[in-house]
Amino acid sequence: MAVIKYTDAELDLLARLMRAEAEGDGQLGMLLVGNVGVNRVRSGCLDFNDIRSLQDMVFQSPGGFEATTKPYFYQRARELDRNLARRVVNGERFTPGERSLWFFMPTGDCPAQWYNQWNTGRFKSHCFFSPTVQDCPNL
């Protein structure tokens, strides 16, 4: 059962975002990006108070994803991409993305904090950051 509501079109958006942001980090990297996206829809906190859907999350501005400005994001979702997206909307969580709301690709090591959010780990090229339970109790 899904942990957030979504349409087929929104599942495709999430699938395309996951591929465009993290295809180079393999399937687990894409799943981690999916965790961040689902967490943003579920959280109702911090920068994501007004995010109610995958559509809102993917195109949030300001604070959205750089991938949405690149042509690769606008290519059709593949079945593999959709299957990975289904896994995260159905509640699968992966370390270090279980509670993460942010990720980025640094040029060096992951900083301990990024915009006052704690580093929860790195997977290949991306560092992941999570809020405290006090800041986001719904995650």
Image (spheres, rainbow, N blue to C red):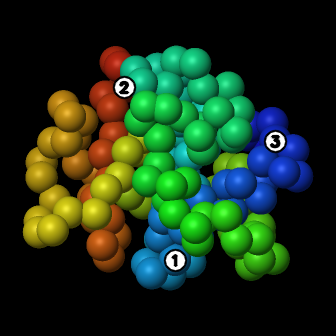
Work out whether residue 73 can be spotted: yes
**Hey, which residue is sitting farthest right in the picture?**
8
First-in-chain label (2 vs 3): 3
**Label 2 neighbour load within 10 Å: few <14, some 14-19, many 20+:** few
Give the amino acid at mark 3: Tyr
Please, what is the three-letter code of the amino acid marked with disc 2? Val
Which three-letter amino acid code belongs to the residue tagged 1? Glu
Out of 59 and 111, give the one closest to the viewer: 59
Q: CA distance from mark 3 to mark 1?
A: 22 Å
Q: In the rendered structure, which disc, 1 or 2, sits on the residue that comes first in sequence?
A: 1
- Looking at marks 3 and 1 on the same chain, the residue that comes earlier in the sequence is marked by 3
Label number found at residue 23: 1
Task: Tell me where residue 6 appears, x and y as whole percent.
Answer: 81, 41
Residue at 35% x, 52% y: name it: 103
Q: Nearer the viewer, residue 12 or 36?
A: 12
Classify 10 Å Cα crowding around label 1: few (below 14), some (14-19), many (20 and above). Answer: some
Q: Nearer the viewer, mark 1 or mark 2?
A: 1
- CA–CA distance in space, label 2 to label 3: 26 Å
Residue drawn at x 46%, y 20% as measured from the top left: 45
The picture quadrant where one finds residue 100 is top left
Q: Label 1, secondary structure: give it.
A: helix
Given residues 14 and 61, the one toward you in this image is 61
Question: Which residue is at 59% across, 40% downward?
Answer: 59
Label 1 to label 2: alpha-carbon separation: 30 Å
Q: What residue sits right under mark 3 in the picture?
A: 6
Q: Is residue 38 left or right of residue 24?
A: right
Q: Dividing the picture into quarters, in which one does residue 14 lie?
A: bottom right
Position of residue 91 measured from the top left corner of the image (x, y, whole percent): 68, 50
Asked if marks 2 and 3 touch (Cβ < 8 Å), the reply is: no
Q: Position of residue 126 (x, y in %)?
A: 32, 65
Which numbered dot is residue 133?
Answer: 2
